[in-house]
Amino acid sequence: MVNPNRCRPALLPLLLICLLLLGLFGRSPASGATLSARVDRNPVALDESVRLELTIDDPSAGEPDFTPLESAFEILGQSSSSNIQIINGRQSRSRSYQLTLMPRRAGTLTIPAIRVGSAQSNPLELVVTDPAAPSGGREERDLFLEVEASPSNPYLQAQILYTVRLYIGLSLANGSLSEPAAEQLTVHKLGQDREFSTSRDGRGYRVIERRYALFARQSGPLIIPPLVFQGQSGRSSASLFDPFGRVGPSRRVRSQAVELEVKPPPVQAELPWLPASEFRASLERSDPDAPIRAGEPLTLTLTLEAHGLAGSTLPEPRIRGDEALRLYPDQADFEQLQEQEGMVGILRKKIAVIPARAGSFRLEAIEIPWWNTSRQRPELARIPAMLLEVEPGLSHPGTGSGQAQETVPPSAAQAAPTVPTEPTHPGLKSNPWFWLSGLLAGAWLLTLLAWRQSRRSQKTNKAGEADEKGRPAAKAATELRELAGQLRQACRRHQPRQARQLLSRLAQLAPLESLQPLEEELDRLNRYLYAQEDAAEAWDGSALWQAWQTWEQTRKGAKQRGSARRGDGLVPLYGDHEPAG
C-alpha cells in the first residue's frame, strides 16, 4: 500500500510549474497593448485642420473613446485601417485611427490621452495661432467670404436681399457653406449659384455667389450671424505612380456678422400690410370674344403679382357684382418664383359667373392697398369695374334655335269660303272652288289637332321638369347639411383655414349675396388669415358659427315663403323662367 504522505513532496514542483505557465499565458491581451498618438503638423493656424493618428499594436483591445477631444476640437472626419506584418516568420498586427480635427480656439491646446481598454495614449500639446495678418497693407488671403444685405433698414415682413460671395484663390477638393439663420427670420434661397472670375490687388480669384431672400418677422435690431465655409484644399501628386493627387488639410473661413434695424409698418399704411417693390392686379375672362348668355357660366381669372413677397402672404380680395350675377369662387392657387433679383409671389383664383337673365350687369371695382418699398409711399392696385352684356340663353323659352310651328286661330274658319247648300251634281266636283274649299277646311282641322297636341306636350314637359328639379335640390340640401356640420366642428375647434375653405364650398350651394348676415364675420376671418400680423390671440370660431345659425334661420324662412311659388327653398341655378304659353 502506497503512503500518500510520500507523494506530497513530489507534487510541489509540478504545482510551481503550472502557476508559472498560468502567469505567462493567462494574462489579458490588452494588458500588454501600447497606444501611441501623433499629429501631422504643429503649430497650426486657427480655422485650419490638423490630423491626429492613433496606433495600437493589439487590434483586439477594443474601440477608442474620442469624447475627451470634443471640448477643444471639432471632429471633422474619422477613419481606421489595419496592418499585418510578418518578419522572420513572426506575425504582428496593429490598427490605426485617423482623425481630422479643427481647433475651436487659438492658444496652446492639449490633446488629451485616449483610452482603449486598459491602454491609453500619450497626451499632446498643440499650438494654435491666430490667422496671419496681411503684410505690407495688402491682403494675401487665398480664401475668404464677403456678405452684404440690402436694405440695411428694412420694413417688417419686407424682402431683404442677402448676398454671399466666396473668393477662392487656391485649388479646392470639396467644400460646404452654411446658410443664414436667425430667430424671427424666414430664409429663401434665390435661384442657382453664379460663378465668375475677378481680381483683388492684382491677384485672381474664382468667385461663387449665392443670394437669399430674408423676411423679418419682428421689428427691432436684427443680427445675422456669420456664415462658415469649410473645405479641403487639393494638392497635386509629385509621384507618377499617384495620378489621382492628394487631399490637403481642411480650411474654414467665416464672414462678418450683419446688423440690421427692422422698422415697423408706417402709421399711414393700410391693412393688409403688403410691402413690395412692385404690385400688379388683373381680372380677365377666359374667352373675352365669346358672347355671354343667360344661364351659361363664364370663367374669370383673378391674378395678383407682388415683387418682394412670398405667394402665401397675398390676400384673397372679395369680388362683388349685381344681384343677377351668381359668383362661385374656386380655391386660390399660390406660387412663388425664386429668381436672382428677388422673390415674386403670385396668386391665381378662378371665379365662375352665371348670369341669371339677359341684360347689362356690373362687377364692382377691386382695390388693394400696398406699400411701395422702392418709393417709400402707399399705393393702390386697382382693377376697374367690369361691364357684362348678357344675351338671352339659347335654351330660353321663345328664343330656341328650332322654328315655332305656325298655327291658325279658330277665327280663321270664318274667313273660309262657304259652300252652297244646294243639291250637288256631278258638275260641281269639277269646279276648282270646290277643291280649294275642301283643302282649306282640311288644313284648318290639321292645325287645330297639332295645336292641341302641342299644349299636351308642354304640360307633360312641365311635370317632367318639376320631377327632375326635385332630385338635385334634395342632393344639394343634403350636401348643405353635411358641410354645415363640418363648419360647426371647425368653428368649435377654432380652425380658421378649414372654416374659410368650408365657407367657399358652401357659397357654391348658396349665392354670396344670400350670405349677408355672415359678412361681418367673414371680413373678420379674412383679416385674421391675410392681414399678416402677429395675432395676439387665437381665432375664436364661436361668433362665426352664431352668424351661420342666424343665416340658416333666415334661409329656412325664405324657403317656407317661397315654397308656394317654386315648391323648393333652394335658389335655382338659372333663375326662374316661365315658358311663354
Image (tube, grey):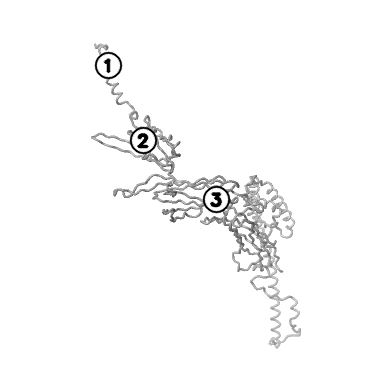
Check the picture and name the quadrant holding the N terminus.
top left
> How many angstroms separate mark 2 from mark 1 (CA)?
47 Å
> How many angstroms separate mark 2 from mark 3 (CA)?
47 Å
Q: Quadrant of residue 56?
A: top left
Q: Quadrant of residue 106?
A: top left
What is the three-letter code of the residue carrying label 3?
Leu
Residue under numbered circle 1: 12
Mark 3 or mark 1: whose residue is earlier in sequence: 1
Query: Eyeballing the image, is 245 above or below 394?
Result: above
As drawn, the label of residue 558 is none
Question: Along the line of sight, which residue is nearer the eye, 304 or 219?
Answer: 219
**Residue at point 71%, 84% (across, down):** 434
Q: Report helix, strand or loop for mark 3.
A: strand
Which of the two marks, 2 or 1, is nearer to us in this view? Answer: 2
Q: Report helix, strand or loop for mark 1.
A: helix
**Residue at point 74%, 81% (across, down):** 416
Q: Quadrant of residue 332?
A: bottom right
Q: Is residue 63 left or right of residue 433?
A: left
> How many angstroms separate mark 3 from mark 1 (CA)?
88 Å
Q: In this view, which residue lies farthest toward the front?
A: 136
Residues marked 2 and 1 touching at CB (< 8 Å): no
Residue under numbered circle 2: 37
**Residue 197, percent from left and from top:** 43, 56
Residue under numbered circle 3: 214
**Residue 487, percent from left and from top:** 64, 49
Question: Along the line of sight, which residue is nearer the eye, 10 or 56?
Answer: 56
What is the three-letter code of the residue carrying label 2?
Ala
What is the three-letter code of the residue carrying label 1?
Leu
**Residue 571, percent from left and from top:** 69, 58
Question: Along the line of sight, which residue is nearer the eye, 504 or 190?
Answer: 190
Q: Is residue 262 left or right of residue 62?
A: right
Q: Report helix, strand or loop for mark 2.
A: strand
